[in-house]
Image (cartoon, grey):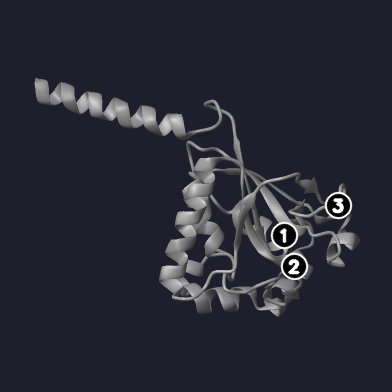
């Protein structure tokens, strides 16, 4: 009986700890911000993740308020293309989102992703809590150990996130032919398979 009671207490403690790590009340969504190069592709990759409820393309990490696409693409705002991800923390954890993020980018590339060149296409994890920062730093170390090379992806505190123009939202769904040609021509999936292997990169 004591053993059963002790087991019950341990389960209750672990459950309480898991809930304590969540920054949102039950039934509400949390958000994560990742920069993975072209935000059309980042949106498409994360929309496939169970537990993700929304993806919004935008700009962040720079010093110009309310930038537009032409300003950002010119590389003079300091911003990078990024996606704000709304997710249900009961169904998918921040750590699991990090795992997906790494396998949807080339973390070895500096100020570029695939065929897109410039700091506006740099990769980054924008954390909002100390727990997110710790998880991001730990995951970055794991990736460096796996790839045995320096990871160029930045880990920085989140600032203002500016939603991109409407025509960029869900671009991969509304302009499927153009999107698929861009992604293939840019060599994104080919490089992901080279880095992570066919099994791990599958579904990106």
Mark 3 touches mark 1? (CB < 8 Å): no
Q: Residues within 10 Å of mark 3 (few under 14, many from 20)?
A: some
Residue 50 visible in the current orientation: no
User: Which residue is label 3 attached to?
Assistant: 64
Which quadrant is home to the C terminus? bottom right
In x, y percent, where is residue 60? 75, 52
How far apart, in angstroms, are the residues tagged by discs 2 and 1? 14 Å
Q: Earlier in the sequence, mark 3 or mark 1?
A: 1
Q: Residue at x 87, y 52 (%)?
A: 67
The answer to which quarter of the image holds residue 122 is bottom right
At mark 2, the secondary structure is: helix
In x, y percent, where is residue 177? 76, 69
Residue 171 visible in the current orientation: yes
Q: Residue at x 84, y 61 (%)?
A: 72
User: Which residue is label 2 attached to?
Assistant: 119
Q: Residue at x 72, y 45 (%)?
A: 159
In x, y percent, where is residue 106? 59, 71
Q: Earlier in the sequence, mark 2 or mark 1?
A: 1
Along the line of sight, which residue is nearer the eye, 48 or 19? 19
Which quadrant is home to the N terminus? top left
How far apart, in angstroms, are the residues tagged by discs 2 and 3? 14 Å
The answer to which quarter of the image holds residue 6 is top left
At mark 1, the secondary structure is: helix
User: Which residue is label 1 attached to?
Assistant: 39
> Which mark lies nearer to you, 2 or 1?
2
Along the line of sight, which residue is nearer the eye, 98 or 190? 98
At mark 3, the secondary structure is: loop
In x, y percent, where is residue 61? 74, 54
Q: Is residue 108 above or below residue 164?
A: below
> Which mark lies nearer to you, 3 or 1?
3
Along the line of sight, which residue is nearer the eye, 29 or 181? 29
Q: Residue at x 79, y 60 (%)?
A: 78
């Amino acid at each position: 009986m004591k053993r059963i009671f002790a087991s019950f207490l341990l389960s209750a403690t672990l459950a309480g700890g898991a809930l304590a790590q969540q920054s949102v009340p039950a039934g509400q969504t949390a958000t994560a911000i990742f920069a993975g190069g072209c935000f059309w592709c980042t949106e498409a990759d994360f929309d496939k993740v169970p537990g993700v409820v929304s993806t919004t393309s935008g700009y962040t990490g720079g010093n110009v308020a309310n930038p537009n696409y032409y300003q950002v693409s010119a590389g003079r705002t300091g911003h990078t293309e990024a996606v704000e991800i709304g997710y249900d923390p009961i169904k998918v954890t921040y750590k699991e989102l990090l795992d997906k993020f790494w396998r949807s980018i080339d973390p070895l590339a500096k100020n570029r992703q695939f065929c897109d060149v410039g700091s506006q296409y740099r990769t980054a994890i924008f954390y909002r809590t100390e727990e997110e920062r710790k998880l991001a730093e730990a995951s970055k170390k794991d990736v460096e150990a796996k790839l045995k090379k320096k990871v160029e992806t930045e880990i920085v505190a989140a600032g203002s996130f500016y939603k991109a123009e409407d025509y960029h939202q869900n671009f991969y769904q509304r302009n499927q032919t153009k999107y698929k040609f861009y992604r293939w021509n840019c060599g994104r999936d080919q490089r992901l398979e080279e880095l992570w292997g066919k099994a791990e990169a599958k579904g990106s």
